[in-house]
Image (cartoon, rainbow, N blue to C red):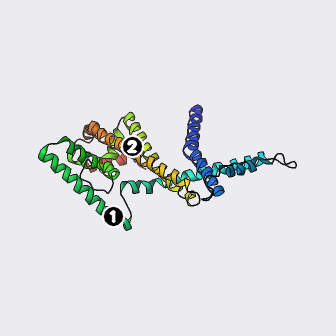
């Protein structure tokens, strides 16, 4: 048991360092460069090197000063980096709403117009396929969405598609069925679903970092390039992870719904049996 707890602690520490501290340290380095260089001297790497040298140079009176400053910087940088990582993770939820089209009230009309435009293009491709049986039209329709568009973005419809398609196929409400189904899924299936969802959340967190890099971009424009690159990668990773996660959800229901139906088959326990069982488990207490 002690070995297991030690291994668990080591893995948690590695995960904490990898997910929070390292990205936070990279952000601090960019922020330091932004404050040192500014817009005017954005390319002056010699100035940046001189600033770093000033932190490590010694004087005849204080030969230990660089080591002390380095220790103090590390002691300050680690918790600040972790806090920045936590902030980026907290921004993952707004990024998810942004990418899935769950936009706030000031943008409701824009979301409605984009959804209407996507739905019009989807119906045109669907009607063309029904009339001519052209596989290219089917591919175009499915590239827009696997269901009639209900969101202004592809990602929103892709994550919503399983609930619509499974309702059409089996007549189930996925939001109601899924918690019960999850409890009887094989461990390997749950692990795969969890890992895929984690990759999707990591993509949204990268989007949170993209938002954070807009802050140093106010004083050092190359940080905007970093923000744009992070946003592009985050969007691409989110699309790939969402596609995999939605497919896995549908596959899990296809392969395990019959098990849930068997477990919940009639006759169900009556209220009298339920009350009797409750009294028995209370043991007269």
Comparing 259 with 194, the one in front is: 194
The quarter of the displayed image where residue 5 is located: top right
Q: Is residue 39 left or right of residue 97?
A: right
Return the x and y of residue 274 as percentages of the image width and height.
31, 48
Comparing 184 with 57, the one in front is: 57
Comparing 58 with 240, the one in front is: 58
The numbered mark, 2 or 1, whose residue comes first in the sequence reads 1
Residue at screen point 39% across, 37% down: 192
Vertical placement of residue 102 versus 240, above or below: below
Residue at screen point 35% across, 57% down: 101
- The residue under label 2 is 241
Extreme residue toward the left, this view: 131
Return the x and y of residue 109 as percentages of the image width and height.
32, 66
The label shown at residue 110 is 1
Q: Is residue 181 left or right of residue 68?
A: left
Q: Is residue 172 visible?
A: no
Residue at screen point 19% across, 53% down: 124
The label shown at residue 180 is none
Extreme residue toward the right, this view: 61
Q: Secondary structure at mark 2?
A: helix
Return the x and y of residue 79 as percentages of the image width and height.
63, 50
Residue at screen point 71% across, 52% down: 51
């Amino acid at each position: 048991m002690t070995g297991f707890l030690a291994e668990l602690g080591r893995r948690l520490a590695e995960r904490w360092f990898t997910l929070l501290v390292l990205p936070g340290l990279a952000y601090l380095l960019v922020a330091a460069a932004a404050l040192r260089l500014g817009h005017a001297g954005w390319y002056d790497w010699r100035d940046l090197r001189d600033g770093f040298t000033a932190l490590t140079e010694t004087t005849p009176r204080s030969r230990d000063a660089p080591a002390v400053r380095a220790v103090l910087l590390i002691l300050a940088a680690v918790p600040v980096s972790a806090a920045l990582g936590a902030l980026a993770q907290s921004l993952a939820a707004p990024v998810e709403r942004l990418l899935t089209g769950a936009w706030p009230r000031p943008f409701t009309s824009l979301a409605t117009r984009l959804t209407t435009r996507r739905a019009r293009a989807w119906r045109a491709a669907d009607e063309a396929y029904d009339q001519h049986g052209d596989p290219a039209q089917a591919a175009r329709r499915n590239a827009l969405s696997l269901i009639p568009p209900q969101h202004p973005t592809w990602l929103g419809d892709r994550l919503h598609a399983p609930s619509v398609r499974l309702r059409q196929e089996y007549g189930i409400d996925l939001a109601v069925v899924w918690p019960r189904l999850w409890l009887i899924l094989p461990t390997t299936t749950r692990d795969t679903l969890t890992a895929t969802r984690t990759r999707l959340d990591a993509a949204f967190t990268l989007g949170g970092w993209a938002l954070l890099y807009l802050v140093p971009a106010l004083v050092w424009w190359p940080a905007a390039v970093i923000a744009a690159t992070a946003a592009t990668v985050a969007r691409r990773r989110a699309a790939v992870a969402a596609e995999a996660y939605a497919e896995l959800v549908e596959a899990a229901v296809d392969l395990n719904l019959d098990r849930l139906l068997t477990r919940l088959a009639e006759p169900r326990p009556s209220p009298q049996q339920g009350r009797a069982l409750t009294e028995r488990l209370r043991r007269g207490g």
